[in-house]
Amino acid sequence: MARFDISKRPPVEKVRSLLDYDPLTGILRWKKNTGRAIKGREAGSIDPSTGYHRTRIFGQAIVSHHVIWAIMTGEWPPEEVDHRTGKSNEWANLRKATRSTNMANRGAQPDTVTGTKGVSYHKVTGKWQAQIGFRKKNHYLGTFDTIEEAKAAYDVAAKHYFGEFARPA
């Protein structure tokens, strides 16, 4: 996800004067007519390159979960905001995160052969191997007879290293 210059974020009070947020639905709505904004209409749209909802405020496109964090807490998030599951913006689905913990909660990459995080097939041994990255180091978890065993090893390690941010393989 592209980062924006956080020093250029508008004051939270200005954002609150422009937008209403429903924490149960995760929807931002305009409070008044300004430019293209129409009072009562949903603010922002999905960025097709990232799949995240963005809202344009004072000429700057900002991911909506950061805007929501500012509205709900009264301050912009210092680092990142993580979605517990998926990309929905309900308040219960959002939590403060670091870059590392946010990445830990990422799903498997679309180009992975196994369709799972941290598990690959080792051709030489004919077994499945598991590994996990933590603090810029790769931790080898072993080789296993089945993909299920390798996934289970990854899940245990993810819980150990990432706690509540762990996402199962």
Image (cartoon, grey):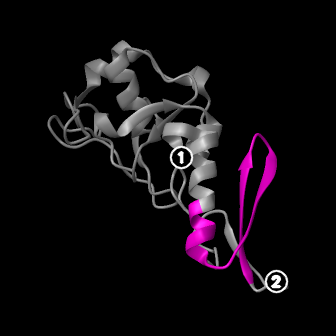
Of the pair 119 and 17, the residue shown nearer to us: 119
Q: Residue 19 has which mark?
A: none
Q: Tag 2, which secondary structure? A: loop
Residue at image position (73%, 80%) is 127
Which residues, given as a range, are shown in magenta? 127-152
Magenta stretch, main secondary structure, is: strand
Using residue 12 as the reference point, say whether residue 164 is left or right of it.
Answer: right
116 on left or right of 131: left
Q: Which residue type carries mark 2?
A: Thr
Residue 30 locus on image (x, y percent):
22, 33
Can residue 78 be seen at all in this image of the molecule?
A: yes
Residue in the image at 65% along x and 39% along y: 100
The vertical placement of 168 against 63, above or below, is below
Label at residue 125: 2
In reply to whether residue 52 is colored magenta, the answer given is no
Secondary structure under the numbered disc 1 in the rendered image: loop
- The residue shown at (82%, 47%) is 137
Residue 139 part of the magenta segment: yes
In screen coordinates, is 99 left or right of 51? right
Pointer 1 residue: 166
Amino acid carrying label 1: it is: Ala
Q: Quadrant of the C terminus?
A: bottom right
Residue 117 placement (x, y as % from top left): 61, 63
Classed neighbour count for the residue bearing mark 2: other residues with Cα under 10 Å, few (<14), some (14–19), many (≥20) = few
The crowding category of the residue bearing disc 1, from other C-alpha atoms within 10 Å (few below 14, some 14 to 19, many at least 20), is many
Q: Tags 1 and 2 in contact by the CB under 8 Å rule? A: no
Q: Nearer the viewer, residue 72 or 11?
A: 72
Residue 42 picture location, percent across and down = 22, 43
Q: Position of residue 57 (x, y in %)?
A: 40, 32
